[in-house]
Structure formats: C-alpha cells, structure tokens
C-alpha cells in the first residue's frame, strides 16, 4: 500500500475557530476525518499529524525518507521562512518521493509576506486556495 504522511504545521490545530473567514469553519478533526476517509477509498495508507514545533516537523520529514512515504505538507507560517524545513523537504523529493505543498487559503491573494514560499522550489507540486479540498486533491494526485 502506498504510504502517505499528511503533515500540518503551526496553528492548524485551531482550524474552525482561527480566522474562519480565511480558513473556513471545519475543524482539525474534520480535516483528519475527510482525509482518512478519502484515503481509505483510494487505498492509500495515511497518517495525519499536526505540530506547532518546527523540529518535530523536520523529524517527521526524515521519517518520510526512512519509511519511503509520500508527503502532503501544509507548512503553515513555516512556508514563508523555514530553511530547515525546506532542506528536509528536499531530502524527500531527492529520494524520488512526492511532496505536495498544500494550503487552505491562497497565500498569493493575501499579505505580501505570504507570497513567497521557501518550500515550493523543492516540492513536487503546490495546491492552494481550495479549503480542505486542497488536501483531497493532493490525495487524488498521489493515487494516480
Ligand atoms: C496556510 C497559509 C499560511 O500563510 C498561514 O501561515 C497558515 C495557513 C494555509 O493553509 O492557507 O497558517 O498555510
């Protein structure tokens, strides 16, 4: 079975209550259940995680390399400045594994500091702006 780690960065545990005008009203629990149920129907083996800690996210990317798992990553605010996360993402894609960067909102339509992603240059692809569907589209891509 194809293994997929779905990794979420800081503040995404507050989905539903955090800026619902930007991120919608679905909670993090809703995200986990939507992702796990679509993954089951696509026969993907998923593990969905969230952390507010950069070093934990880096360690999970190392784990993706070691376990040969593809990655769907919402790096949240780390998108815009974390070179350590970028370097860890590069290890995943250099291994021939897919890493899809996802965003709930469209960062390009928001504040200028969100327009730059230090992750996109080493990602396999980017899906942004479709709410929780960004994750579901990424799962469908990985199932191809
Ligand atoms: C986000 C966009 C980021 O700019 C922001 O810092 C987030 C969430 C998104 O999913 O739209 O925390 O990654």
Image (spheres, helix red, strand yellow):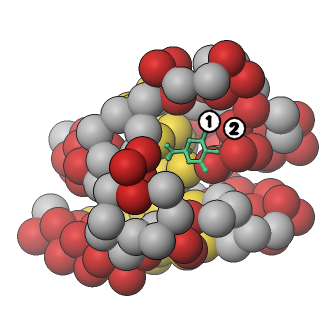
Percent x, y for residue 27?
37, 75
Secondary element at tag 2 = helix
Percent x, y for residue 11?
64, 65
Secondary element at tag 1 = helix
* Marking on residue 114: none
Vertical side of 69 occupied by 51: above or below: below
Residue at (73%, 23%) from the top-left corner? 113
- Picture quarter with the C terminus: top left
- Picture quarter with the N terminus: bottom left
Disc 2 residue: CB within 8 Å of ligand 1 = yes
Percent x, y for residue 124?
50, 28
The quarter of the image that holds ligand 1 is: top right
How far apart are labels 2 and 1 at the CA level? 16 Å
**Side (left or right) of 61 relative to 106:** right
Residue at (83%, 60%) from the top-left corner? 54
Provide the residue designation for mark 2. 79
Quarter residue 55 falls in: bottom right
Residue at far left of view: 41
**Side (left or right) of 116 relative to 25:** right
Q: Of label 2 and label 1, which has the lower sequence position?
A: 2
Provide the residue designation for mark 1. 93
Residue 76 visible in rendering:
yes
Camera-side residue of 19 and 71:
19
Residue at (42%, 46%) from the top-left corner? 22
Residue 46 visible in rendering:
no
């Amino acid at each position: 079975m194809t293994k997929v780690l779905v990794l979420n960065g800081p503040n995404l545990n507050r989905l539903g209550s955090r800026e619902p005008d930007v991120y919608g009203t679905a909670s993090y629990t809703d995200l986990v259940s939507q992702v796990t149920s679509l993954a089951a129907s696509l026969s993907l083996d998923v593990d969905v995680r969230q952390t507010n800690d950069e070093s934990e996210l880096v360690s999970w990317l190392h784990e993706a390399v070691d376990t040969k798992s593809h990655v769907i990553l919402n790096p949240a605010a780390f998108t815009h400045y974390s070179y350590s996360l970028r370097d860890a993402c590069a290890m995943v894609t250099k291994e021939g594994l897919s890493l899809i960067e996802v965003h709930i909102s469209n960062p390009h339509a928001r504040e200028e500091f969100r327009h730059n992603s230090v992750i996109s240059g080493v990602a396999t692809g980017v899906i942004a702006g479709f709410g929780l569907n960004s994750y579901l589209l990424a799962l469908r891509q990985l199932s191809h």
